[in-house]
Amino acid sequence: MKKTLTVGATYRPNRRAWLWIGSAAFGLTVSAALLAAAGSAPDVFPLTTPHPVQPVSGRVLCGGQPAHGATVYLYPLDDRRAERWPNGYPRARVGPDGTFAIATDRPGDGAPVGRYAVLVRWPRGPALATNDEDRRADRFNGRFLDPSRPVRAIDIGPNGHADVRVDVPG
């Protein structure tokens, strides 16, 4: 049976239409409430370090040559509490010319004020090993990854750019 609607006629929704309209309205209301609640929730997982950062850059050489592909880590000697480091400790990848710019939250943003042990890891070949089993893949065999015997220690002050020069023996 074909239903037609004539001009000037009034449409009266049947039971099925009312159920659909009601469920759509309910869904939109719940969605709006959830979005409003999410916007007012506290930041449980901060994306930035809770302390201001200072620019830190430098150069890593091995036997006078750039240590391209090495990773420089700044291991905090003052405060290692996890809540201070939501994105991990400051670090940087060494470029083809041996230079690096430390990142804590964003590329090249720097590191918070404090005292740090400078650690260096330089993987062999293209594989970037990340766990203890793969330390043998480090060209330095883990010699410069011990915070108690760092390559060097640095102090990052509240109002200045730290320039770190590291020349590790080949």
Image (cartoon, helix red, strand yellow):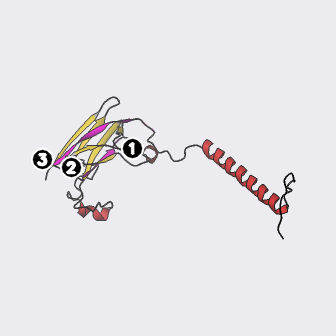
| Front label number (1 vs 3) | 1
Magenta highlight range: 50-78
On-image quarter of the N terminus: bottom right
Which residue in the rendered view is the most extreme toward the top?
Answer: 159
- Location of residue 57 in the rendering, given as x and y in whole percent from the top left corner: 27, 39
The disc at residue 96 is 2
Q: CA distance from mark 3 to mark 2?
A: 13 Å
Please name the residue that numbered disc 3 is placed on: 64
Q: Quadrant of residue 2?
A: bottom right
Does residue 42 appear to the left or right of 80 in the view shown?
Answer: right
Rendered image: mark on residue 1: none
Q: Secondary structure at mark 2?
A: loop
Res. 106 mark: 1
Q: Position of residue 16 (x, y in %)?
A: 81, 63
Q: Amino acid at mark 3?
A: Gly
- Asked whether the beta carbons under mark 3 and mark 2 sit within 8 Å of each other, the answer is no
**Mark 2 residue type:** Pro
Position of residue 26 relative to residue 1, above or below, is above
2 or 1: tag closer to the N-terminus:
2
Establish if 29 lies above or below 52.
below
Looking at marks 3 and 2 on the same chain, the residue that comes earlier in the sequence is marked by 3
Q: CA distance from mark 2 to mark 1?
A: 21 Å
Q: Sequence order check: which comes first, mark 1 or mark 3? A: 3
Q: Is 124 situated left or right of 64 in this image?
A: right
